[in-house]
């Protein structure tokens, strides 16, 4: 065993040296107003030749892993605290950790298997590159959770500037660094193994999402998105209501993390409340989102994010969507004429989803929807995506024709003689037989 410790120590130094050299050569000046030096945080975590072999190999491995986690996570970051890290350094750190993980599993395979087994996992089924991360979770997750929590707002405090007070106690930069490290660790493990680690990952993710800093919140949300894609509702267990409450509390988040909020909330509520379309969580979440969108209907980033990620929630509630038509349709009809093609195409896709789920029964919006679609069909002549826009419009009109019959014919009757809509009229009246058959086939397979 002593040889294994020595060999691992030498490997740590071997892997650390090029990272430390690259780190030393990288120009770095702490961002203006920052109270921490990220470079100074990383350097002590990397072992060097002068350091004697550490009999506590766990501490050396943990420190090296934390350094690699921070450097690797910078790859997807634009934050001032991490944007100075060059891509090659980020890539080198990621590769170095993979190499360490493989060597560690060889040198301490029996111990690694035992520790992974204590977490309820079969070591043999866990990919080799994930085993060291899994073993480190029980030690690293509580550490990062506490680091994030140090600059959180104490909700028991009253009066004063809570954010300033929290940041004065401990600079928020430490929480941002810890949040990026946490997100890296949480996203290294996937299905089916991540489910066994929920009790370690979720408390830290909730602490991050509950933080006042959007930068910290964002990393917690990305972690929850990964969690939602890789675990089951059963594995989330008793955390379900707490997680969904955290989602609702964060719907009014900053612009820069709104897309994370929508994706996180949609994935988690459809996972946790699957098969229960009348769940009050669906009602609360949809109402919170719609209220936020109604306050800023012209905000492109917010509407695009909502339209892009809301599909699973719409599908999960099905016919219950009818109760929300009076709020959804005014937004959709307004966004249909947005200046950007991305919004228009997403709106048309969501309209098709809504039509298929509800058959748009018992609604006064048929006439208005047909009117707006005909206007958009003509407006599409000036759009780059005009062919795609017009194809979606025809698909929607065919769906309306199928499900609303005479009500559709009455609404369409006002427009069918418009020469600018001749192609539509031909398709809808059956004269464009080949086109109709093609559209019906496409619609049936959407």
Image (spheres, grey):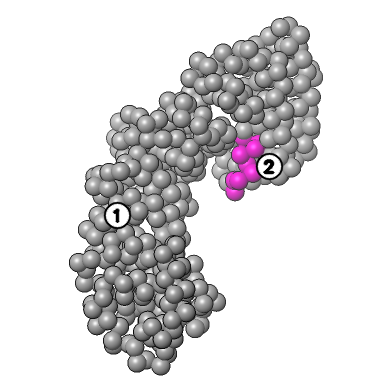
Which element is circle 1 on? helix
Examine the image and state in which quarter residue 307 appears: bottom left
Find numbered disc 2 in the image and state the secondary structure of the residue it sits on. Answer: loop
Determine whether, in the image, residue 424 is placed left or right of residue 91.
left
Asked if residue 137 lies left or right of residue 444, the reply is right
- Of 135 and 437, nearer the camera is 437
**Quadrant housing the N terminus:** top right
* Label drawn at residue 85: 2
Q: Quadrant of residue 188?
A: top right
Q: Residue at x 76, y 21 (%)?
A: 11
Residue at horizontal 31 percent and vertical 72 percent from the top? 402
Spatial CA distance of label 1 from label 2 is 46 Å
Visible in this render: residue 120? yes
**Residue situated in front as seen by the camera: 208 or 355:** 355
Q: Give residue 24's quadrant in the image.
A: top right
Q: Where's the C terminus, which quadrant?
A: bottom left
Residue 46, x across and y down, in percent:
70, 25
- Horizontal placement of 372 versus 258: left or right? left
- Residue 49 appears at what percent x and percent y? 79, 19
Q: Nearer the viewer, residue 96 or 37?
A: 96
Tag 1 near tag 2, CB within 8 Å: no
Residue 203 falls within the magenta-colored stretch: no
Compared with 285, 272 (above or below) is: above
Q: Is residue 234 above or below residue 262?
A: above
Magenta stretch: helix, strand or loop mostly: helix
Q: Earlier in the sequence, mark 1 or mark 2?
A: 2
Q: Nearer the viewer, residue 281 or 206?
A: 281
Magenta stretch in the rendered image: 70-78
**In the rendered image, which residue does mark 1 sit on?**
318
Residue at 38% x, 83% y is 430
């Amino acid at each position: 065993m002593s040889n294994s410790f020595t060999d691992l120590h030498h490997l740590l130094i071997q892997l650390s040296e090029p990272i430390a050299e690259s780190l030393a050569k990288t120009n770095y000046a702490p961002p203006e107003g920052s109270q921490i030096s990220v470079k100074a945080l990383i350097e002590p975590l990397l072992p060097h030749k002068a350091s004697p072999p550490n009999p506590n190999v766990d501490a050396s491995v943990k420190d090296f892993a934390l350094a690699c986690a921070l450097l690797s996570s910078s790859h997807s970051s634009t934050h001032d605290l991490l944007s100075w890290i060059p891509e090659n350094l980020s890539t080198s750190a990621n590769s170095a950790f993979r190499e360490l993980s493989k060597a560690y599993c060889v040198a301490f395979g029996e111990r690694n298997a035992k520790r992974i087994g204590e977490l309820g996992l079969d070591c043999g089924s866990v990919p080799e590159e994930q085993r060291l991360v899994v073993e480190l979770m029980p030690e690293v997750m509580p550490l990062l959770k506490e680091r994030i929590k140090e600059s959180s707002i104490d909700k028991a405090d009253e009066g004063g500037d809570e954010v300033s007070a929290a940041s004065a106690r401990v600079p928020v930069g430490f929480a941002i660094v810890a949040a990026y490290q946490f997100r890296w660790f949480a996203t290294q493990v996937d299905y089916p193994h991540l489910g066994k680690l929920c009790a370690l990952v979720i408390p830290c993710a909730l602490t991050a999402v509950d933080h006042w800093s959007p930068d910290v919140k964002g990393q917690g949300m990305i972690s929850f998105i990964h969690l939602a894609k890789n675990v089951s509702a059963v594995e989330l267990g008793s955390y379900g209501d707490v997680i969904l409450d955290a989602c609702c509390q964060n719907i009014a988040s900053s612009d820069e993390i709104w897309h994370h909020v929508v994706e996180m909330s949609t994935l988690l509520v459809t996972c946790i409340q699957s098969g229960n379309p009348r769940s009050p969580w669906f009602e609360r979440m949809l109402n919170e989102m719609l209220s936020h969108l109604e306050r800023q209907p012209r905000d492109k980033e917010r509407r695009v994010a909502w339209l892009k990620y809301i599909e699973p929630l719409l599908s999960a509630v099905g016919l219950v969507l009818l109760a929300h038509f009076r709020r959804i349709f005014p937004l959709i009809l307004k966004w249909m004429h947005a200046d950007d093609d991305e919004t228009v195409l997403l709106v048309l896709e969501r309209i098709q989803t809504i039509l298929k789920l509800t058959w748009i029964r018992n609604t006064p919006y048929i006439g208005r929807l047909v009117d707006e679609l005909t206007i958009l069909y003509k407006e599409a002549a000036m759009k780059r995506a005009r062919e795609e826009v017009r194809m979606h419009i025809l698909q929607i009109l065919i769906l309306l024709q199928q499900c609303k019959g005479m009500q559709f014919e009455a609404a369409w009757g006002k427009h069918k003689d418009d020469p600018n809509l001749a192609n539509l009229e031909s398709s809808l009246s059956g004269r464009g037989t080949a086109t109709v058959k093609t559209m019906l086939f496409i619609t049936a397979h959407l």
